[in-house]
Image: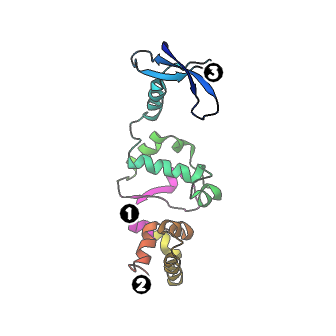
């Protein structure tokens, strides 16, 4: 960046020291004027615009970052690969993996579009102990998915879910995670649409 004028000494943002400051002009095509500290002897190459351009190029390989299918893919990877993810203990923590092909979005997207993906459908593994891979995955309606997962719910468990929800300690999402079902199933139980009291 090109030095325009020195501003003198100022108290640092943390308030711990004094720093020299100056106004710089960002290189073409930005040409934005920015104030920067010069105390560390290093001058940034841009106002930040070059960094944002680089991030944008990296993030928009396929232009589908804001699609529901992209979010399905990200959620799948989070459950399996991110130790801090809410569902990790039930997925990656149990040894469930994502096949190498699906570590990239485009191959996953292409498989999904050929294998029945539509908005409103649930991404599901046929074998709940199996990996996320083409031979074990499918798309189901919420009702089909609930039927597959609710066979572990009995009237006794449904009443326990209702009792836990009444305490106010458990959200529907926490109950869904605790009992290994979709949040919609918990909602149906709490609202007496299934396993009626």
Q: Secondary structure at mark 3?
A: loop
Pick the front one: 5 or 65: 5
Query: In the rendered picture of this protein, how many numbered marks are placed on residues?
Result: 3
Pick the front one: 1 or 108: 1
- Mark-to-mark CA distance, 3 and 1: 59 Å
Residue 1 seen in the figure: no
Residue 138 higher or lower than 52, as above or below: below
The disc, 1 or 2, on the residue closer to the chain's N-terminal end is 1
Report which residue position mark 3 lands on: 40
Which mark, residue 141?
1
Quarter of the view holding residue 32:
top left
Q: Are marks 3 and 1 in contact (CB under 8 Å)?
A: no
Which mark, residue 133?
none
Depth check, mark 1 against mark 2: the one in front is 2
Seen at 46% across and 22% down, the residue is 34
Residue 141 higher or lower than 190, as above or below: above
- In this picture, which residue range is highlighted in magenta? 120-147
- Mark-to-mark CA distance, 3 and 2: 69 Å
- Mark-to-mark CA distance, 1 and 2: 22 Å
Expressed as whole percent of the image width and height from the top left, the position of residue 91 reads 59, 57
The disc, 3 or 2, on the residue closer to the chain's N-terminal end is 3
Seen at 42% across and 68% down, the residue is 184
Where, quadrant-wise, is the C terminus in this rendering? Answer: bottom left
Report which residue position mark 2 lands on: 196
């Amino acid at each position: 960046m090109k030095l325009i004028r020195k501003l003198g000494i100022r108290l640092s943002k943390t308030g711990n020291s004094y720093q020299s400051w100056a106004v710089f002009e960002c290189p073409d095509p930005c040409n934005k004027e920015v104030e920067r500290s010069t105390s560390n002897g290093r001058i940034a190459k841009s106002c930040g615009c070059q960094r944002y351009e680089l991030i944008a190029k990296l993030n928009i390989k396929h232009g589908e970052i804001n699609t529901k299918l992209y979010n399905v893919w990200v959620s799948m990877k989070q459950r399996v690969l991110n130790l801090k993810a809410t569902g990790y203990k039930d997925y990656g923590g149990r040894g469930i993996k994502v096949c190498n092909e699906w570590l990239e979005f485009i191959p996953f997207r292409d498989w999904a579009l050929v294998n029945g993906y539509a908005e409103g459908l649930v991404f599901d593994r046929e074998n709940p102990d199996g990996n996320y891979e083409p031979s074990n995955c499918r798309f189901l309606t919420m009702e089909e998915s609930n039927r597959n997962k609710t066979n572990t719910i009995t009237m006794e468990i449904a009443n326990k879910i209702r009792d836990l929800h009444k305490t106010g300690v458990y959200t529907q999402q926490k109950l869904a995670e605790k009992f290994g079902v979709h949040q919609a199933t918990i909602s149906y139980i709490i609202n007496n649409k299934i396993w009626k009291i």
